[in-house]
Image (cartoon, rainbow, N blue to C red):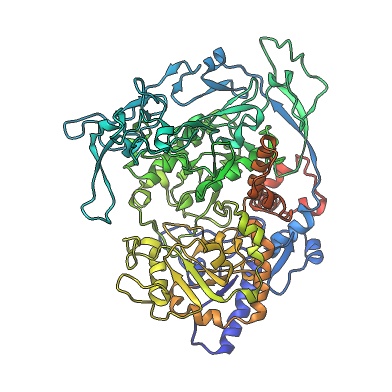
Amino acid sequence: MRTIRSTKCPWAFVGVAGVLVMLVTAVHVFMVPILPSSLDYFGARRSVRRPRNVLPGVGVVDSRLQGQFPSDSHGVVAFRGAPWKAEIGRWLAGCNAGSSAVNITEFLGAKRCEQDCNGHGVCNHELGECRCFHGYAGKRCEEVQKLECNFPSSQEWPVGRWIVSICPAHCDTTRAMCFCGPGTKYPDRPVAEACGFKTISPAKPDDPKLTDWKTPDPDVFTKNMSKPGWCNVDPEDAYSSKVKFKEECDCKYDGLWGRFCETPVECSCINQCSEHGHCRGGFCQCDRGYFGIDCSIPSMYSLAYDWPSWLQPSMDLPDLKNISSSPIDVKAVAKKKRPLIYVYDLPAEFDSHLLEGRHFKFECVNRIYDDKNRTIWTEQLYGAQIALYESILSSPHRTLNGDEADYFYVPVLDSCLITRSDDAPHLQMPRDLHIRSYHTLEYYRMAYDHIAQKYPYWNRTSGRDHIWFFSWDEGACYAPKEIWNSMMLVHWGNTNTKHKNSTTAYWADNWNDIPFDRRGDHPCFDPRKDLVLPAWKQPNPAAIWLKLWARPRNSRTTLFYFNGNLGSAYKDGRPEDTYSMGIRQKLAAEFGSTPDKQGKLGRQHTTNVTVTYLRTEKYYEELASSVFCGVLPGDGWSGRMEDSMLQGCIPVIIQDGIFLPYENVLNYNSFAIRIQEDDIPNIIRILGEINETQIEFMLRNVRQIWQRFFYRDSILLEARRQKRLFSEEAPWSVEVSQLDDVDDVFTTFVQVLHYKLYNDPWRLGILQRKETGLPDICSKAS
């Protein structure tokens, strides 16, 4: 990536400085992009522990690989079309490509659960413990919980103070969800949020309607056809306009479809239960003998009925149809490739309950299903967490044998947790100060307590081989101190070298007030061990069919493009000065191409630069018609890097000291530009000085690696599921299936893990005792 700063120094000095920078880069292959904020790494420590900007093992790759795979003039060693930083690309080219499968012994659990969880949960046969459905608890799932929809009532708040689950009708206390209930024609129709309360008419014609949360609306139960009802409204009569209905009522809960929730549909579950169960509201109810969040883990009991194709049975199997009262674990052999990942089957409150109890079907998932059970992809940027999780669970890199595992994935779904933190009273934590980031920290800490107490793996390495995903706006900034040794997957790579505190403008996510004894003093991102992953972007069949990422230079007529919220100076803009750390506001003040509230354009507005807040249906087309596209933060990260790459536009990154996806492993000089925040007024001059040869070079690299910013593997998993149900493929399935079979997000993630595995000195003693499937040149790094 080119890092550019305006200067008044003589060109001779710049040349010398450039040589020095190249020398530093050669030694510190993973250094922060070269800009003053990142050069703080070489300065004095101020308020945050400064991470060395080098992944373990840099510089220890066998010298023979250096001869075989020299770097180019940009410091790149290419591997599978991507411009990697030299040491990583060299190792991957020589070692990852040549790795062979190894035989791994898998242990299939045989522990029973008491009373088979009473039909209200799924037995984890590895631990012999029940994972109970939402609203059930106890060792045998024998306890029926009472999860209220409402807070206690008072004279001021007759139904209780507002919360998402607030309910003036019938509360399903196993899920804290509100329905019409007994005595109505449609008892299972949701009465969610504003539906059940009086509406306050706007004072002015253009003002929005408001909700009186203190006054329930009895008309939702009316049978009077002249009043806008809900619970007794017949869908056919409403569709034909024979009756009125309340427009504030809709079908928010998952599993229901239609304007009046008249059609039951498939819910969103992880991997849709892997053909070994069915999805009940977000929780997989598994077939006999299978378990795991997606019913993908076989046990000794399932083998009597079905032997998974990826397992080879051992020669000393017990008689599976006559299992004794003291069962033993079954051993089976599977062909695998390292790195091997063990996925914890956590208690349901960390994942399945968060899905099953969703009050809004679009929350935290990357897909839902329509009235024909066809896939509808969501625009939920946090859906990356679900996509990666599904790919890991379905991957040949997954192992059920923790003793053979190279990494351990801890699947807390923070994207669901944060969006649901105000959903219902039972999710409240008095100690979290009503701060969602603090609330999330406590959940991760409870997950840490669980795996440290129930499994032997954490204490072997103090968690250094564990992986946690923090998908929310400021990533792992609020990770509990106990897990900081682990690898963090994030979308927000803030090293805290410049922006040292919480950068969000939304108070409930601000982590500055989290007590030190809970969070500790870690940065938000440590490039030596962590990785920034792309956000979720739904498959757009039209954009793929048009191959927008491949649009040539002569069709890109806009020099610079940015479309997004520009702050309080513009209509509907965020009012906080701290939104986007003020960066978007500075850009708009200089180059705004749409008038602000005062009717003013940016000071330097010009015809070939677009900086606007106006949403457009041609957003992807406009990106694909641009040479350079702005990558600026929002409340933490935004999805602009992914938008740029997927439309073939050269990213221009303006956020000092904050890493973008793969920036500590790929050579960003080859396909992106970094400009300092202080140089915003000089952007257009700087971009105009880049010659056409360099532009073509960077566009070509963007075209080669755009799928590394796309969750193709997870999308194809869903395409295969849909093909089993329907003879006719959906347009998104057709287009994604026809893409070139090149590396996507998941493949890139695995490649990074593979490199780290053999280039981290503390792992070498462990690896020497395992079958690696690698030539000696790769496994002797020290």
Where is 501 relative to 358, above or below?
Answer: below
Where is 131 relative to 341, above or below?
Answer: above
Q: Residue at x 71, y 59 (%)?
A: 60
Observer able to see residue 760: no
Between residue 575 and residue 187, name the one nearer to us. 187
Count up the numbered dots.
0
Q: Residue at x 77, y 58 (%)?
A: 93
Residue 247 image position (x, y, % from top left): 35, 41
Q: Quadrant of residue 641?
A: bottom right
Between residue 217 and residue 404, name the one nearer to us. 217
Q: Quadrant of residue 555?
A: bottom right
Q: Residue at x 60, y 52 (%)?
A: 539
Observer able to see residue 668: yes
Between residue 391 and residue 447, name the one nearer to us. 391
Residue 353 image position (x, y, % from top left): 48, 31
Q: Residue at x 21, y 34 (%)?
A: 157
Where is 592 relative to 503, above or below?
Answer: below
Left or right: where 738 falls relative to 184: right
Q: Which residue reaches farthest left?
A: 155
Between residue 646 and residue 461, name the one nearer to us. 646
Q: Quadrant of residue 772?
A: top right
Residue 439 image position (x, y, % from top left): 39, 41
Task: Work out which quarter of the rendered image holds the C terminus and state it.
Answer: bottom right
Left or right: where 432 falls relative to 370: left
Task: Work out which quarter of the rendered image holds the N terminus and state it.
Answer: bottom right
Where is 735 relative to 84, above or below?
Answer: above
Residue 464 image position (x, y, % from top left): 59, 44
